[in-house]
Structure formats: structure tokens, C-alpha cells
Amino acid sequence: MFDTMTFTKILGGFAGAFLVFLLGKFVAEEVYAARVGGHDGEVVQGYLIDTGAGDEDSGAEESGPSFDEVYASADAGKGERVFNKCKACHKLEKGDNSTGPYLYGVVDREVDTAEGFGYSGALEQVVDIWTPEHLDGFLKNPQGYAPGTAMSFAGLSKVEDRANVIAYLATFGG
């Protein structure tokens, strides 16, 4: 059935395929990475796209009304539509946790106090109480506001959307 020559051919085929994959990996590393300081230097990204994140002008505040001004005239009805993005992970019924904690009474509630939910602990290091201002900062960029948080949502970029959804959440509990 299997003689020595057949076994040698199969083993040689696997070894040859492995060498082709290693060669492909080597070529890809050379094409997509630039080496600094010679052959043994640090590997850095070969194709860098300038986003302007390091520019001095990027620190300027965005123009437009402040969160407090927008929140004063926020529409809870519009916030209900924005909350549809949150429904995948959060529920509004007290004690009904999902992927994320329940949001019943979240406005002006202490952080990490949803009963029965296991928090990562990252939020406690940033804030004590979920005031509308703290919720605004967190909803704008959860990972940037509380590094290490388990919330993987990218955030709401529009201040109006954040104010409306916070106004909607304020109608639950208290």
C-alpha cells in the first residue's frame, strides 16, 4: 500500500508547501514593512497615512454649540431613535442585563452599580456618577474616555445625538 517512495513524496510535498508559505511571509514582510537601523532594526509601518492627528491645529475645539446648550433643548423622541443603536447590547428594564448593563435610571446613577452585571473596572477610575456631562464624554468615544472599558461601541459623533439619547435615558428611572 504505502511504500517508502510514496511516503517520501508526501513528506516532501508538505515540506515544499511549508517553504513556499515561509517565502511568502518573508516577501510580504519586506514589501509592507520598512526597517529602521539596518537589517536588525526596529520594524515600522511601511505605508503611513497622515491623518493630521499630530498637527497642532487638531487640539482646537470643534465649532458649534456646547453640550450644555444642546442638552437644554434635547428631544427625547429623537433620542429614542438614536437609542436603537444601543438596543443590541443594552436594555431599559431594571435588572435586565444583556451584553451591556441595563440603562434604567442610568442618568445620575453611580457608576458600575447595575445589579448582576460584571464590570471591567475601567469606568470607576474615570468617573463616580453618570451625570449628563460624563455620559456625553463616554458616548462620544467610549474607549478614549475610559481606556480598558469592555464597551466596543465606536461612539456617537454628533453632539445632538448624544444629548437626545441622554434626554431619552433620563426619562427612565430617577
Image: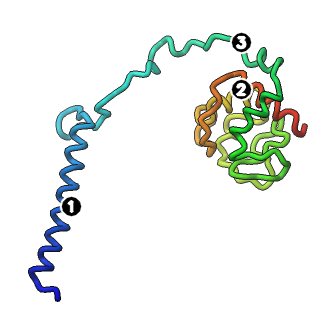
Task: Name the colouring of the figure.
Answer: rainbow
44 relative to 161 in the view: left or right: left
**Residue 36 in the image: above or below residue 50:** below
Proximity of marks 1 and 3: CB atoms separated by less than 8 Å: no
Q: Position of residue 41 (x, y in %)?
A: 23, 37
Q: Counting residues from the N terminus, which is met first, the one under dot 1 or under dot 3?
A: 1
Graded by Cα atoms within 10 Å as few (under 14), some (14 to 19) or many (20 or more), the crowding at tag 3 reads few
Measured Cα–Cα span from mark 1 to mark 2:
52 Å
Q: Counting residues from the N terminus, which is met first, the one under dot 2 or under dot 3?
A: 3
**Which quadrant does the C terminus fall into?**
top right
Label for residue 161?
A: 2
Q: Amino acid at mark 3?
A: Pro
Q: Amino acid at mark 2?
A: Asp
**Which quadrant does the N terminus fall into?**
bottom left
- Secondary structure, mark 2, is helix
Q: Position of residue 38 (x, y in %)?
A: 17, 35
Which quarter of the picture shows residue 2? Answer: bottom left
Q: Residue at x 10, y 83 (%)?
A: 4
Q: Residue furthest left?
A: 5
4 relative to 96 in the view: left or right: left
121 relative to 51 in the view: left or right: right
Proximity of marks 2 and 3: CB atoms separated by less than 8 Å: no
Q: Residue at x 18, y 56 (%)?
A: 20
Tag nearer the camera, 2 or 3: 2
Q: Residue at x 68, y 40 (%)?
A: 123
Q: Counting residues from the N terminus, which is met first, the one under dot 1 or under dot 2?
A: 1
Q: Amino acid at mark 1?
A: Phe
Of residues 143 and 128, the one nearer the viewer is 143
- Secondary structure, mark 3, is loop
Per the image, the residue denoted by label 1 is 18
Graded by Cα atoms within 10 Å as few (under 14), some (14 to 19) or many (20 or more), the crowding at tag 2 reads many
Per the image, the residue denoted by label 3 is 65
